[in-house]
Amino acid sequence: MAKRRNFAQILLKNGLVSQEQLEEAQNLANKTGDKLANCLIRMDYVTAANVMKAMAEEHGVRYVKLSTTEIPPTVLELMPETLAREYVVMPLDERDGELTIVTSDPEDFATIDKLTFMLNRRIEIALAPRDTILEAINRCYGQAIGESADAMLQEFTDTAIDFTETVEESVIPGDEVVDESSAPIVRLTQLIITEAVQLRASDIHIEPFEDRIRVRYRIDGVLVERDSPPRRLLGALLSRIKILSKLDIAERRRTQDGRIKVTVGEKELDLRVSIIPTNHGQSVVMRILDKDNIKIGLRQLGFAEDDFNLFNTLIRRPNGIILVTGPTGSGKTTSLYAALNALNTPDRKIITAEDPVEYYLAGINQVEIKHQIGLDFASVIRSMLRQAPNIILVGEMRDLETAQMGIQASLTGHLVFSTLHTNDAPSAVTRLADMGVPSYLIASSVIAIMAQRLVRTICKKCRAPFSPGQSVIESAGFPPAMLEDAKFMRGRGCSACGMKGYRGRMGIYELMKMSSKIRELTFAEAPTAQIRQAAISEGMKTLYYDGLYKVTKGITTIEEVMRVAKMSEDD
């Protein structure tokens, strides 16, 4: 009897993944404890649909395209919505007392046994990706948890009930189950957070104005406004958020920072809360920190092949400083964590100093900066060196003392990663000199500087070929060689991307290696423009050039690249 091929071998046989990609995904699965299928999908090597088709072939069951499948109401009645949501399964059809359900895990025998017992029917399975099952549940059964933030806000707007009087009694501390019996403001806060997570938002902004409260979510780097709660709910909403973040409810004049741990679906998330007083009341920003976002390999950052090979080589140097530059929200932390994940082996000691620690990494010693007790970057780095680390990460080089300590660490045989706020890679040299770091120390310690930005990527479900006008191509400044095999794409807009045409983000990079020529210019305190020209002549691709390259590969659009990077005289 022939041995049954598993889904990975089927993907390999069909040419959907390479052996190298399989091995890389298997390494990530071993490190994180996640399943191989999830790692392949997360690393963008293969689509969830192709993985499910291969699994269906492996197990000899049907693959179902739920987006185009109509499920009769008589079949939906056979499975309560609560069961469908709890186990993320969907009833498909019923024949001779046997119910076919759609699942994303063909080997979850415990769930199949439970459903067989609870529904008192024989169960047959079919397969579909998890996200399409959730979409089908929402489509067929109605919106999640029987109520939405929109519905609650409409109810608050339509009635004149004042919820602020009872808020002190109702907003009891943090881990309670939020159900229909919870106070309305408790449910509203939970629904706002849940909705933001479902929409893949990175931040929730709650801003008070004279006559309303504005709620906005930052999705793929762009703020999107949601329905506004009535102004009278501000006090109750702030009190709820402060209690969850363990902050002082009575303090209204000073800034406050806190953290909230929440569970949305099966995900445990950290929310970093920042509250500042404004002229119309206190404004809140909640940063959603999802651990899954930093479990990515260097491949998924979006490097061009030559930049990937260079960066991979540089991070394996025994000593020196690697700087990552860019504005807030440009993905610097994610890039550095991806580098640390690649280097995180039992034979290396890694220590980080961060303000604050955003994500907790297994196997890495992370120190949180606390200025109020004198625990600043310089003192932490000084103490770090006594811990005999191989690799050090300094959250940010903010001043001369921090920069000098980082440089001293690199000169004494440590590999140092850090960030700096500059517009491009060459200007980081000038920025360090402005801080007061001697040019000979910059030249001898820095081994590479990488600038980066994030661009939105075209939605894979609605992308279509597109031909930009000749005038657009000329004004964008595409090099003729780049246009030879260009594949321009754009998103038409669909339910998966909220009709935006974009879903997800990717980095564009400018990686400058400190060659002997650039070291000489640094030592001679040459202007930024001269260093930039020398780097480009030695093969450095600028941010704008790397963005144009990704446009010609059908990954993003010209408008997105121009939104975050500008063409310079050197491009």
Image (cartoon, rainbow, N blue to C red):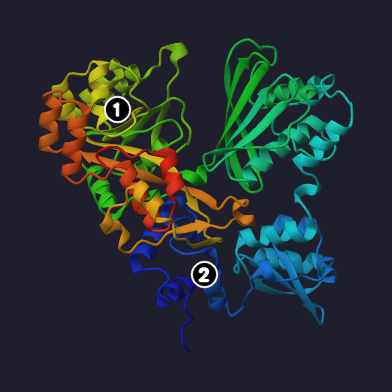
* Residue at image location 15% in from the left, 25% down from the top: 526
Residue 125, how many percent across, how many down?
A: 67, 73
* Residue at image location 38% in from the left, 39% down from the top: 565
Q: Nearer the viewer, mark 1 or mark 2?
A: 2
544 relative position to 146: left or right: left
Q: Which mark is residue 37?
A: none
Tell which circle, 1 or 2, labels the residue nearer the N-terminal end: 2
Up-down: is 15 above or below 333? below
**Kind of element beneath mark 1:** helix
Report if residue 343 is visible in the image.
no
351 relative position to 569: left or right: right
The residue wearing badge 1 is: 387
110 relative position to 353: left or right: right
What count of labels does the image hold? Answer: 2
Up-down: is 103 above or below 501? below
The residue wearing badge 2 is: 50
Dividing the picture into quadrants, the one containing residue 332 is: top left
**Tag 1 near tag 2, CB within 8 Å:** no
* Residue at image location 24% in from the left, 24% down from the top: 430
Give whichever of 68, 271 is nearer the camera.
68
Report if residue 190 is visible in the image.
yes
